[in-house]
Image: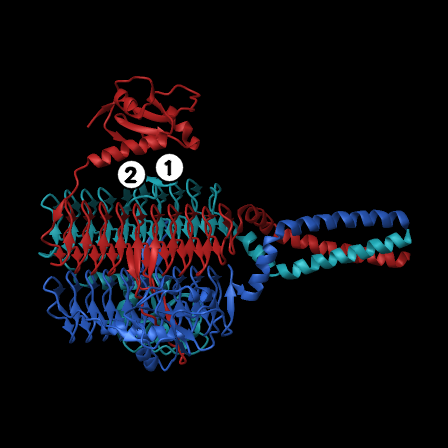
Chain colours: A red, B blue, C cyan
Amino acid sequence: MEFTAQQIADFLGGEIQGNPSVKVHTFSKIEEGKAGTLSFLSNPKYNHYIYESKASIILVNTDFQAEKEVKATIIRVEDAYQALALLMTMVEKANPKKVGVSTLAFVSPTAIIGENVYIAPFSYIGDKVIIGNNSMLHPHTCIQDGVQLGENVVLFSGVTIYNNCVIGNNCILHSGVVIGSDGFGFAPTEDGSYKKIPQMGIVEIEDNVEIGSNTTIDRATLGSTYIRKGVKLDNLIQIGHNVEIGTNTVIASQSGISGSTKLGKQCIIAGQVGLAGHILIADGTILGAQAGVPNSIKIPDQAFQGTPAIPVSNFRRSTVVYKNLPELQKTIFELQKQIKELEIRINSIS
Amino acid sequence: MEFTAQQIADFLGGEIQGNPSVKVHTFSKIEEGKAGTLSFLSNPKYNHYIYESKASIILVNTDFQAEKEVKATIIRVEDAYQALALLMTMVEKANPKKVGVSTLAFVSPTAIIGENVYIAPFSYIGDKVIIGNNSMLHPHTCIQDGVQLGENVVLFSGVTIYNNCVIGNNCILHSGVVIGSDGFGFAPTEDGSYKKIPQMGIVEIEDNVEIGSNTTIDRATLGSTYIRKGVKLDNLIQIGHNVEIGTNTVIASQSGISGSTKLGKQCIIAGQVGLAGHILIADGTILGAQAGVPNSIKIPDQAFQGTPAIPVSNFRRSTVVYKNLPELQKTIFELQKQIKELEIRINSIS
Amino acid sequence: MEFTAQQIADFLGGEIQGNPSVKVHTFSKIEEGKAGTLSFLSNPKYNHYIYESKASIILVNTDFQAEKEVKATIIRVEDAYQALALLMTMVEKANPKKVGVSTLAFVSPTAIIGENVYIAPFSYIGDKVIIGNNSMLHPHTCIQDGVQLGENVVLFSGVTIYNNCVIGNNCILHSGVVIGSDGFGFAPTEDGSYKKIPQMGIVEIEDNVEIGSNTTIDRATLGSTYIRKGVKLDNLIQIGHNVEIGTNTVIASQSGISGSTKLGKQCIIAGQVGLAGHILIADGTILGAQAGVPNSIKIPDQAFQGTPAIPVSNFRRSTVVYKNLPELQKTIFELQKQIKELEIRINSIS
């Protein structure tokens, strides 16, 4: 498929600068742009690339000011990144989708499979599983007994969902995701060994959730571990048993949420963050990379970093002093000396 | 199955307060209790829920003192959480177990399969593998040549065990666990590239070990990586080559143990902790969340936190000062000024 | 197969001390050495084991000085660890390799499979996939449409490669590795929800790369995520979209590289390190365990640690003061008191 700059500008409601009849058939990064491709410029860090880019069309924000001649045809739109995303989504939707249940899959006779579902070779669908319309299960997915999947769900290869867990509509689970494995619950005994506490709850994932590869979400001891609507989890994240992640909260890679902790809505959690168990995190909380949070955060919309986490402005100023600690210590020792000398002098005077 | 409060109290040796003939058929969390369910109260943080809970029966510790009327039937037992665990374990054991070798599995003719074993569709059992009685292998497990599994072992879907590794009795390995992948061993060469050191050892896992989803345990370069009896590992943990984890040690999610390090018995390692390679950690050591341990810990039963890890009480006091570092630095600069002023005054006097 | 000390010394160009006709048939660790095994001593930490070791032959560095009698036959070589690696590599190569396409695998009729390839049961090979000669795909590997694998590639069980990604020659990917899952790209919308940015790029992995178990590498939004020649990644690492890892860089377990960051050549990244997005790391940079790097590092061959990362010598001195912070604070408060007292005394004098 090819499109002209004019067609794209009309579709996006953008303003053309340059040749309106130039054609593109795919996308490119601005620094790797080639003839026949459409690129974009959003982050000002990359501004200098636009003058050299060989892309045929470049989307820019309305406020972009060229400092030199730009060879490409420019289309000005309100938000270049969003416009790009819109075009990419269109192209992606135009791709043919796989449909049908492979004869190389195992599907329990008691499972209920919706319409236009794709079940790839070597998928395992257990007893009484329900799979909604238009869902896609790639190879080696394992859906244990009693699981419910909504509509338009995509499970990439190697996703495992333990028995009785519930997944909403429009969810995307990437390869290696494990939903519903046992929470880490053991009771110490007198001889020093630990006794397993059966984990009899489930995981409930609401609509429009995306979960990155090899992330693990444990089932509740009793009741449910909840992942609310619109949550986005990156790769290699750990969600403990009985945790609740609030609506539209996003968590970056390798963060871990300990058991029974509840995160509010619209939180932004950076990478490698750790949260203690049994705490509450207020709506809109922002946690910087590698933060460690031992206690509840009660005031919404605040930012924290460090271990233990402190307000982010405090953290930044403390890190500066931390770097200078050796010099500061020296200063203190010198002050001690100076005071001693002053004392001696005063003693000699009085 | 339904049970009366009287039957449950008799079984647990507990004391009833309320209606002994009320019946329950499942479990619930105290804050989500419904009629017909049994709940429990153990952590005093949750005490306030007992007065509103709609659970029919609530297990409490003998020392629980009600401050208001409790509508549910109460059963007092020595340890409410342990009593609950006992009941849940009973119910779980009453569930029918899957048995039999699926015709959709691949089983090498030289493998030896015990009695009452379950091998799910799409499992792969290599040459000369031995699987003990009553073990369960869920779909997509991959047991490479020469592996030995004990009795009552449960492997959830997608578990991989590389060749010749040994797993004891009563072990539970959750989905995505990898046992016996190559240790990270490379020798630098003169041109800057690295040469692989073949990893010819194995992993030995003793009895009663549980391993959380997507945790990885590398095989030894020579000899064995040892996971001793009763060890409990949470999700997404990394165990390097030639590591030894001592009996009944528990490790929380996302911690990593570098190569050749030996942990003692009965250690408690929190989440996101990192241990350097080639060090020894004494029995009973406790490491707080996100600790980084560069050196051996020789005295048993001590608690540490921080990077590098220091005694936990020291860590707590240092973090308080860390937060105040900007103010402390200001104080020091003021002291410098004050001393200079004093000096000038003394100079003027003497 | 058995070899004499004389044969091994001749092969390695080493110097024998002891009985040249003693035979070995396998390898052992020096502390677990048995008759009939060959062991080695490289790290001086382990020197004391050589006097007790029951290994028949022990490789040592030329500069090793025995302090007591050594019972084993010693072979002196320039680098005992490299010599061991050479012998182990030989033995490993002598092992018979699996070859052939299992009838229990799914192979698209449009896939092109090279010579001497092994495709295990339950592998999935999508449309237009190309697999180079001598490659091995263990069970449950999932190679999506359009993927290209080089020659001598080994994919352990459960590896997933998303569509159109490219893997070079001689690469080893351990179990559970995910290549090409979607980058974490979402645009915020006005109602607080996030809109997915389609990830239309790929991952390109060059020759001689090894990737540890359950590591995840995300596909680029546009263009490629690059893993350059000779890179070695440990287990459970996260590589974000559009990242580039430079030639011969090694990264230890559980580290994470955020989107669009570029690491230079010959870097050494320890475990649990985190790098922010959109930064550049100079060639030869060394990052200590658990470092957090928020900004670009421009000078090559420097070592850093801490969060935020500072020069490693600075970090070490700061950690010492950090430990003493409570005492230091006390000292400062005492200085304040002393100064006040001095002031009073001066006031009374003047």
For marks 1 and 2, the one nearer the N-term is 1
Callouts 1 and 2 on one subunit: yes
- Give the crowd class for mark 2: few <14, some 14-19, many >=20 residues within 10 Å: many
- Residue drawn 49% across and 70% down? B67
Q: Which mark is residue C198?
A: 2
Q: Give the side of residue B164 with respect to residue B111, left or right.
A: right
Name the secondary structure under disc 1.
Answer: loop
Q: Position of residue A233 (x, y in %)?
A: 35, 49
- Residue drawn 89% across and 54% down? C348
- Residue drawn 42% across and 27% down? A48
Q: Which mark is residue A34?
A: none
- Give the crowd class for mark 1: few <14, some 14-19, many >=20 residues within 10 Å: few
Which residue is nearer to you in this view: A314 or A128? A128
Q: Give the side of residue B145 with respect to residue B189, left or right.
A: left
Q: Chain of mark 1?
A: C
Quadrant in the rendering for residue B114: bottom left
Q: Is residue A310 above or below residue B252?
A: above
Name the residue carrying label 1: C189
Query: Disc count in the image?
Result: 2
Name the secondary structure under disc 2.
Answer: loop
At label 2, which amino acid type do we have? Pro
- Residue drawn 79% across and 48% down? B340
Which residue is nearer to you in this view: A53 or B266? B266
At label 1, which amino acid type do we have? Thr
Q: Position of residue C282 (x, y in %)?
A: 44, 43
Which residue is nearer to you in this view: C329 or C283? C329
Q: Is residue A40 above or below residue A6?
A: below
Quadrant in the rendering for residue B203: bottom left
Q: Nearer the viewer, mark 1 or mark 2?
A: 1
Q: Give the side of residue B65 with respect to residue C224, left or right.
A: right
Q: Position of residue B142 (x, y in %)?
A: 20, 62
